[in-house]
Image (spheres, helix red, strand yellow):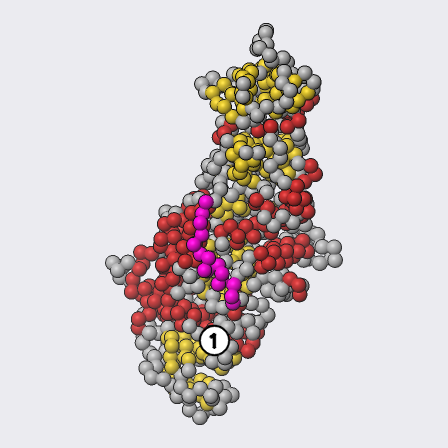
């Protein structure tokens, strides 16, 4: 313009270098250049609005159009005595909007938050970083904060700026590496990302590592969200920690939420899943990872949004509703948690601010050899904080009752899946990843301190000492550990033809050599029924009848064995095909129009009765983790394929489990029993006709006879059904 508007004079010009840094997204303090500030001669205003035709300052008794400086910058010096409470009237080609100026606000992140972030000790990190809907200085909007210490500059962009990233540069908050900007008028449902200027001057557009909601994949923008959920599970939350997990009944139904019944949302799952699980008698469900992930075929194990439940099935509050519904049905919720690695997608965590940040600086330490992913840098305090707070987040915000920690072994060993020369030892010359050990100890100690009643479970496949030992005794501090050895050994045994099983007898007994070294879960998980491993029933040899019989006998043995039970969906009704995340379980085999439906329903009936008999028998869980709760009766009958053992409750009351893994009925079989019990009655028999068995069972209670057997003065004379497990109680 040749003549300035009434009362508006040119503001002092920006230094050319400062202007360039601002427009190129390299400025650490845009608030020093933008907004309003009193100076000699009045108040100077400067606004950055690319594509605007004009910008007008509007306040009480004031309306002044700023001068166009070019490049989307508008400025002016107004003859005012102080900065007024002003707004911006921004005119575009076809639109005019009136908004607050983001650059007139003080930082919306407090000193204590910054101090805790700097120390790596912010246990509620999600309240400080990410997009937070709030009222700030009396104005509603959203505070954006992101940790990017290597960035030259960071800008927030989204649908509010038509994805033009120039307009909203963020300010650096000191030495913490945190960038912040409060955007007035921006609220829930807004899509956003961060435009980061890397150390080399290039730009990278990134989803928010702390986003609590994301677009439905393959779209990947972050979504501003705030929870309005009102929980109805107070009774459950108060009672869940009364008994430690390793001394309580725990029978877990593992499922992949997106494919349990394909097409269901969190809300529709909440209508169907609790009643199904409750009817079958499981005490807990375990969800494969629900954190946001780009590729459905990873089943959730390659996470990009550690703080966001996947939006494929609904909103974060919809997920809360599902957890709440399970709690109100008396069912605990365990969620798989994946702190071992993350994928390399260029819009997510990898080289987030242009340099390795979440991953290790050493490329050999950063690359995960098995999965083409990146390993976290557990030695970096901010990364450790990101993960520890994330574990707390799922427990606090979503009321989950357990975290099953994936791939712990790959975290613990520096040489995991690495050849000689591809790894460097720790400071003591060992192969242990001391940073990962410290992270797991801190995570467990923090979760147990902050979230009463939560159990952490390690998927750890090696002989690492003290996985479930408390951290103050030098252990990793987990509550439970998956017993991978037991799973591999026993599945090897049952997959053999009965005539060959005698040569593998120790596969079924070896687990008791170390059964009390840790607090164990016996996992028949998704990993055992995919990738050519076949479903559980299809691993069994023989014809269809023998396969089902062995499947049932195995479950009977497993449910009585020391350790908690875990069974993957579809195995509860002996589906014959491997699991596929595309189709989910073969529910059609239960339909009455299918000729073998009765066979599959029979196995499901057995699982229901196993769970009910198990929960009703304290002998099977009260002393699960101590030797006093178990005694072998018959561990050496290899030629007979027979196993028998006793379990004991705290009050000494026993349960006798006898398994016959041969296809013949064994008449008059002697089983030694404690002499103080006058009568034993059969409480479960996997050969019953209702389950699809041959119906060999004991109608009447059995009275011990004064005939010594297996080193005991009295014994029962039993008829052992073929391929079956029998439980007896006094």
Is residue 364 shown in magenta? Answer: no
Q: Residue at x 71, y 58 (%)?
A: 430
Q: Is residue 500 visible?
A: no
In the image, 449 versus 300, the foreground residue is 449
Tell me the SS state at disc 1.
helix
Snapshot quadrant of residue 350: top right
In the image, 321 versus 276, the foreground residue is 321
Residue indicated by mark 1: 619
List x then y, in percent, for residue 200.
67, 31
Snapshot quadrant of residue 464: bottom right
Specify the segment rendered in magenta: 228-243
In the image, 313 versus 394, the foreground residue is 394
List x then y, in percent, for residue 331.
43, 60
Is residue 229 shown in magenta? Answer: yes
Q: Residue at x 62, y 33 (%)?
A: 106
Q: In the visual, does 21 lie left or right of 520?
A: right
Tell which residue pokes out farthest to the top in this image.
2
The 10 Å Cα crowd at callout 1, few under 14, some 14 to 19, many 20 or more, is many
Q: How many marks?
A: 1
List x then y, in percent, for residue 390.
56, 49
Q: In the visual, does 275 lie left or right of 672?
A: left
Q: Residue at x 46, y 60 (%)?
A: 236
Q: Residue at x 57, y 16 (%)?
A: 66
């Amino acid at each position: 313009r040749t003549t300035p508007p009434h009362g508006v004079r040119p503001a002092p010009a920006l230094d050319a270098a400062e202007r360039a840094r601002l427009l190129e997204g390299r400025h650490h303090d845009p608030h020093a250049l933008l907004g309003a500030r009193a100076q000699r001669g009045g108040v100077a205003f400067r606004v950055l609005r690319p594509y605007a035709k004009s910008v007008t300052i509007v306040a009480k008794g004031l309306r002044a159009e700023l001068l166009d400086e070019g490049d989307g910058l508008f400025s002016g010096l107004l003859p005012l005595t102080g900065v007024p409470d002003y707004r911006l009237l921004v005119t575009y080609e076809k639109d005019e909007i009136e908004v607050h100026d983001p650059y007139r606000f003080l930082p919306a992140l407090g000193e204590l938050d910054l101090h805790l972030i700097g120390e790596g000790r912010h246990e509620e990190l999600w309240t400080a970083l990410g997009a937070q809907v709030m009222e700030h200085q009396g104005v509603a909007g959203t505070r954006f904060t992101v940790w990017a210490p290597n960035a030259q500059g960071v800008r927030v962009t989204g649908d509010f700026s038509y994805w033009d990233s120039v307009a909203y540069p963020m300010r650096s908050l000191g030495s913490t590496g945190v960038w912040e900007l409060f955007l007035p008028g921006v609220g829930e449902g807004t899509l956003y990302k961060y435009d980061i200027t890397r150390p080399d001057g290039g730009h990278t557009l990134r989803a928010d590592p702390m986003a609590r909601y994301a677009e439905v994949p393959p779209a990947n923008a972050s979504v501003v969200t705030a929870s309005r959920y009102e929980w109805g599970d107070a009774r459950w939350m108060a009672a869940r920690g009364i008994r430690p997990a390793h001394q309580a009944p725990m029978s877990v139904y593992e499922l992949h939420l997106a494919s349990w019944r394909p097409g269901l949302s969190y809300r529709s799952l909440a209508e169907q899943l609790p009643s199904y699980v409750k009817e079958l008698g499981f005490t807990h469900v375990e969800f494969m990872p629900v954190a946001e992930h780009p590729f459905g075929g990873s089943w959730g194990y390659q996470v990009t949004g550690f703080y966001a439940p996947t939006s494929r099935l609904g909103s974060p509050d919809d997920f809360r509703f599902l957890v709440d519904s399970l709690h109100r049905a008396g069912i605990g919720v365990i969620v798989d948690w994946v702190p071992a690695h993350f994928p390399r997608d260029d819009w997510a965590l990898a080289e987030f601010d242009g340099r390795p940040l979440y991953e290790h600086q050493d490329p050999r330490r950063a690359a995960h050899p098995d999965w083409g992913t990146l390993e976290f840098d557990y030695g970096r305090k901010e990364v450790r904080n990101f993960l520890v707070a994330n574990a707390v987040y799922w427990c606090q915000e979503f009321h989950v009752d357990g975290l099953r920690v994936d791939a712990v072994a790959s975290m613990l060993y520096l040489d995991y899946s690495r050849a000689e020369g591809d790894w460097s030892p720790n400071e003591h010359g060992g192969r242990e990843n001391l940073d990962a050990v410290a992270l797991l100890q801190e995570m467990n100690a923090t979760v147990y301190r902050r979230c009463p009643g939560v159990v952490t479970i390690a998927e750890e496949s090696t002989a690492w000492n003290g996985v479930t030992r408390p951290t103050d005794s030098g252990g990793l501090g987990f509550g439970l550990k998956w017993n991978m050895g037991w799973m591999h050994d026993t599945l090897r045994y049952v997959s053999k033809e009965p005539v060959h099983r005698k040569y593998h007898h120790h596969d079924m007994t070896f687990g008791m050599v170390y059964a009390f070294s840790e607090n164990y879960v016996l996992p028949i998980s998704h990993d055992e029924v995919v990738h050519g491993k076949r479903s559980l029933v299809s691993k069994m040899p023989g014809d269809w009848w023998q396969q089902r019989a062995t499947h049932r006998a195995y479950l009977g043995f497993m449910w009585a064995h020391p350790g908690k039970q875990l069974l993957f969906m579809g195995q509860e009704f002996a589906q014959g095909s491997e699991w596929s995340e595309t189709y989910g379980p073969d529910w059609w085999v239960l339909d009455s129009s299918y000729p073998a439906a009765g066979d599959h329903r029979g196995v499901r009936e057995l699982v229901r009765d196993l769970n009910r008999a198990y929960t009703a028998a304290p002998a099977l869980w009260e002393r699960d983790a101590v030797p006093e709760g178990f005694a072998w009766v018959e561990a050496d009958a290899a030629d007979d394929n027979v196993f028998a053992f006793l379990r004991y409750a705290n009050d000494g009351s026993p349960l006798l489990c006898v398994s016959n893994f041969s296809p013949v009925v064994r008449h008059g079989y002697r089983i030694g029993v404690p002499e103080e019990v006058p009568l034993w009655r059969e409480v479960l028999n996997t050969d019953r006709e209702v389950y699809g068995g041959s119906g060999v069972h004991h109608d009447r209670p059995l009275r011990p006879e004064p005939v010594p057997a297996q080193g005991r003065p009295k014994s029962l004379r039993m008829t052992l059904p073929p391929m079956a497990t029998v439980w007896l109680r006094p």
